[in-house]
Image: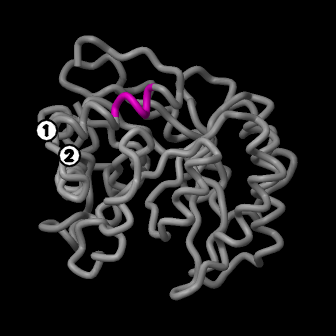
Amino acid sequence: MFIDSHAHLDSPRYSEDRADLLRRAQAAGVGGILAIGLGEGPHEMQQALEICRQYNGQSGMPQLWASAGIYPHNTHEIDQAALAKLDRLLAEPEVIACGELGLDYYHEGTPHEIQHRGLVQQLEIAAARKRPITIHCRPKDGTSDAFDDLFPVLDEHWQKTGLGGILHCFSGNEREARRLIEMGFLISFSGSLTFPKAEPLRAVAATLPLDHLLVETDAPWLAPSPHRGQRNESAWVLHTAQVLAECLGIEADQLASSTTKNFYRLFSLTPNVGN
């Protein structure tokens, strides 16, 4: 069984066939999906939880969990009402993670200092609710600027919690990955690992310990080869998993078992023996 550790199931791109998408994932061997609760801003971050409650327990569907958080480029929308809403959502049992939150310097938009403040505010709420985090960190091309700013924040506000988290859609170097692992993070690879020009990222993946790795889709974006350019979906996490297994020199079944165990360990979940 595989787990898609990061998918935006609340995307309007799934509004016509979300149930069919989930059935395809289950049929492909994806037994669980972490639905990321961002929406188009704080006013929609409850949608992932609503999807979990709509589909969990239905026959032929994977297990769904939710996160809740405010994306870096939406941090300018943070006010006391948004923070209170985040706190309420993180209290719900299906909402196992806070995020995705972090720093995005690749796209122009929300000033870095506002992203930084929003990140710290969310870390404080996640710590109080004892929820691991899922981090988005994207530097400008050819730089490490976002990681350089992220690490001091995590050192000061997060590492002491011992809660750890996920660095989703990892695109950094080995030094950055290992520093995150030392902080208790799992490194999650998306479909970008399968792209022809991603050889440097595959080289990094080959050096990392199996007990700190995850796979994800970031659906509906970043569809892996051979589906690149199409709307992504959770069933296709198997393409990323196969490439990651090849990087590590192991079988896909071993990767499935290990990444699923890693996910359950991080979130203190009990495996569903039916999957």
Q: Which residues are magenta?
A: 260-264
Return the x and y of residue 61 as percentages of the image width and height.
24, 27
Disc 2 residue type? Ala
- For the residue carrying disc 1, how many other residues have a C-alpha within 10 Å: few (<14), some (14-19), or many (20+)? some
Q: Is residue 114 left or right of residue 138?
A: right
User: Residue at 58% across / 39% down in the picture?
Assistant: 46
- Residue 12 shows up from this direction: no
Residue 198 left/right relative to 226: right
Question: Farthest residue in the top direction?
Answer: 273
Q: Which residue is mark 1?
A: 28
> In front here: 54 or 259?
259
- Quadrant of the rendered structure where residue 30 is? top left
Asked whether disc 2 touches disc 1, contact meaning CB atoms under 8 Å apart, the reply is: yes
Local SS, label 2: helix
Write the residue at 83% across / 61% down.
117
Between disc 2 and disc 1, whose residue precedes?
1
User: Looking at numbered disc 1 in the image, what kind of residue is underneath it?
Assistant: Ala
In this view of the protein, can residue 77 be seen by the observer? Answer: yes
Left or right of 156, for residue 8:
left
- Asked if 81 appears above or below 92 in the picture, the reply is below
Q: Nearer the viewer, residue 221 or 190?
A: 190
Quadrant where the C terminus is found in the figure: top left
Give the class, few, some or many, for how many residues have Cα within 10 Å of label 2's Cα (few <14, many ≥20): many
- Residue at the far right in the pictured view: 80
Instruction: Tell me what residue is drawn at x 26 percent, y 64 percent.
Output: 223
Q: Main secondary structure of the magenta part?
A: helix
Instruction: Find residue 153 and report its horizontal and vertical position in percent.
Output: 78, 58
* Place of residue 177 in the rendered image (x, y in percent of width and height, measured from the top left): 52, 59
Q: Which residue is mark 2?
A: 235
Q: How many marks?
A: 2
